[in-house]
Image (tube, rainbow, N blue to C red):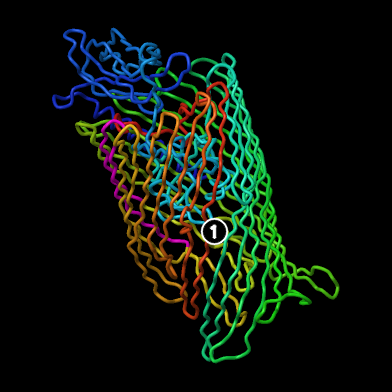
Amino acid sequence: MKRIILLSASILFSVITFVMANRISSVPDEDNPPRGILTGRVTEAGSNVPLEYTTIAVYTIEDSSLVGGTVSDPEGNFEIRKLPYGEYYVVTNFVGYQKKVIDPVHVTPDNNRVDLGLLEMSVDKQSIEEVEIVADRKHVDYRLDKKIVNVSQDINAAGGTAADVLENTPSVSVDIEGNVTLRGSGSFTVLIDGKPSVLEGSDALQQIPASAIENIEIITNPSAKHDPDGNAGIINVIMKEKTDQGLNGVINASAGLNNKYRADFLLNRRVGNWNFFLGGNYNNNLYPGRLTREQITFTDSTDRILEADGAFDFRRSGTQIKGGVSHDFSEKSTLTLEASGGNYGFGIDRSNRSHEYTIPAANDVYYVSRSIMNRNGRYYNLNANYTKTFDSRDHQLTAMAYFSQSVGESTDDQEDYNTGPDYMVEDVIPVSNRSVETEDEYEARVEIDYSRPVGASGKLELGYQARIDDEFENRLYQEYDHDSETWIENALYTSDLDFFRNIQAAYVTYGGEWKNFQYQLGIRGEYTYRKIDHEKSEDIFLINRLDYYPTLHLARQFKNDHQLMLSYSKRVDRPRGYWLEPNRSYVDPYTIRIGNPALEPEYIHSLELGYQKGWGMNFLAAELYYRNTRNLITRVTEYDDSLDLFILNIENLNNDHSAGAELMVNWKFWKWLTVNGSFTPYYYRIDGDINGTPVSEETFSWSSNLNTTFQITPTTRLQTNMAYRSKTVTAQGSREGFYYMNVAFRQDLFDRKLSATLQVRDLFGSMKRDFTNVGENFLQHVVMSREPRVLTLTLSYRINNYRNEPGDRQGGGGEMDFGGGF
């Protein structure tokens, strides 16, 4: 209770400080005269489709001189700041639409925040007969606190998943197993429409169909309004949504060579103030590949060498059904209820041939290993969202309640056959074992967020969040006795674990303007209670602590669409549940894993400096970043002579430093050619101590992406995507570089109601995973490659001209809009 009181007092003190600071700074002076703000939203009349890049100009009524202007963002919103008090008229213009004039508009001390509301623009029928307009959006939009990946512009991701979309995106790398890293880290938070995902990280991104995604927000330095979880930040997936009257929807289906199938649908029906939606998806994909392993173990008298070669089939599958209803009580009050449920599955079937020998020479050992790993589960989640808007879009109250349950089972069956050099397994009795892990997890959240304008240009945000996670895991390991033909439990690898965590959080942010600068300050306080109870340990592992997470965002807008931004945030990376299991877990015939219930969270300090320059649809963006992780959770590989096994441990051992730059350019050279390229050089250093040995490794690496789109006809596109990832180091070794190329061709048919996309992934078969681990008495080298030249055909059918326009949802908590940006 004392900690809760301290947290509440801290937040209250922060609120009072920010408000008082704003009131003091709002006193006018000669260098900073009081000025007003003009806001609104532009849409197409009838369809309510937002109109991006609409020109908004403000003229004085007295002499029609231009005093301000801007262009609308992808949601159709605009904001013009620093308007002197006076009487004006506003003109909106967009090619193919009739000009709209709003007259008069009064900006006064008593009315210094003028919201023009919804501005509907009618299609100019004469213009539309003369020219066909195809509205393209940039592949990546840069905002002050996020990057927004527009999925509709990436035809290479058709028929794929969210992970496939991110494969072509700055800051993100995806390996051949679908593992996603954000700025070199696999630790990030995945949200879906601003709400938590039942699955975590790469697993969640691999299950979300790209065709159901509106856009993806990449937030590497979130404000205090967001959860601080994740070393590298947040990936927020915004799903498609429609609000037009009547029935509309979209159906997608894709099929690829070697058993790759995916389908999804989304239907919406709007009746008056009610909106009903229903969606579902199915996927079943097989990815064959090959793996080679070379391993040397050094002892005092001999060196033992293992050479293994084999094939594997990697499988992913899943189904989901979701539905919901929203009701507009008024233009400013909406309640949405949603529910979803489904199942997921993935696994690997392996078959390896291994040869072991020693130097000096002794008897050679040959054997065949066959293993089948399956992980399956089912889940459901329920959530309710309420939004109340007051006198302006910046004055809003939102509330969210979320509950989910997932039940899963993971099985691993292994058979080893001792053979001769010919690897024949006939009449050989295998050594058989299997492990079964079951888990039952519950998560509940409640969030309340409030924002309101303060003074002429300030904005205050407050919020509270409660998070409860409860998880039970049972791990069973068995060995098969061929004499009795029964499975016998091995108690050494069998155990139960109970995990409980309660997080209570509150935050406050305050943003505003000072001369030519825009700023936002924030702080988040979190009280964490974590308890781990393991049946084989007499200890109960507790964490009971209070943490603070400050954030800072600054922006400087220059003339001619130049913008400079600086941000800082402190974040936390909490240990995953399976990292905390203290029992031994079987991995393969050579390896076991031991968790650590005493693991503590990592703490990350992140600093970014960004620059943007825009020329309409063309832009240049550059970012410099630095990230320092303290109390770094480190995976350590050791060789145990007594067990003749490799042991994977995990400890809080090290600190690391990451620094780099991200350069990106989007340029439309001609109507038929658009190029989007990025280049990311970065430096990484890790310092620490592994098994009493000081460790200091550093590397300079780089990566690049090049996306080229050819608009052959108004309904025909060809797109290529090329990427390179250079060599990099790890705590105990290195990973070799690799490159790949994808090609896609899209044809729209029947007045764009039907689209067909043909794509080839990894055209040159060059994508692979090649890594080396080196320890005190061992060396490992593993190369993994997956099926090349994957050919897929995707069909998409739109019901009642369903279009991929952006919605109004702010996802994971909205964005800081300081007036400007792209």
Residue highlighted by disc 1: 786
Q: Please, what is the three-letter code of the amino acid marked with disc 1?
A: Arg
Q: Nearer the viewer, residue 637 or 580?
A: 637
Q: Nearer the viewer, residue 557 or 485?
A: 485
Q: How many marks?
A: 1
What x and y, as percent, mark residue 753?
Answer: 53, 26
The residue stretch that appears in magenta: 606-633
**Identity of the residue drawn at 61% across and 60% down:** 540
Relative to 306, does residue 741 appear above or below in the rendering?
above
Q: Quadrant of residue 612?
A: top left
What secondary structure is marked by label 1?
A: strand
Q: Horizontal placement of 184 versus 344: left or right?
A: left
Q: Nearer the viewer, residue 452 or 738?
A: 738
Q: Main secondary structure of the magenta part?
A: strand
Q: Does the magenta portion include 621?
A: yes
Q: Horizontal placement of 3 versus 615: left or right?
A: right
Q: Nearer the viewer, residue 626 or 703?
A: 703
What x and y, as percent, mark residue 317?
Answer: 64, 48
Q: Residue furthest left?
A: 30
Image quadrant holding the C terminus, namely top left
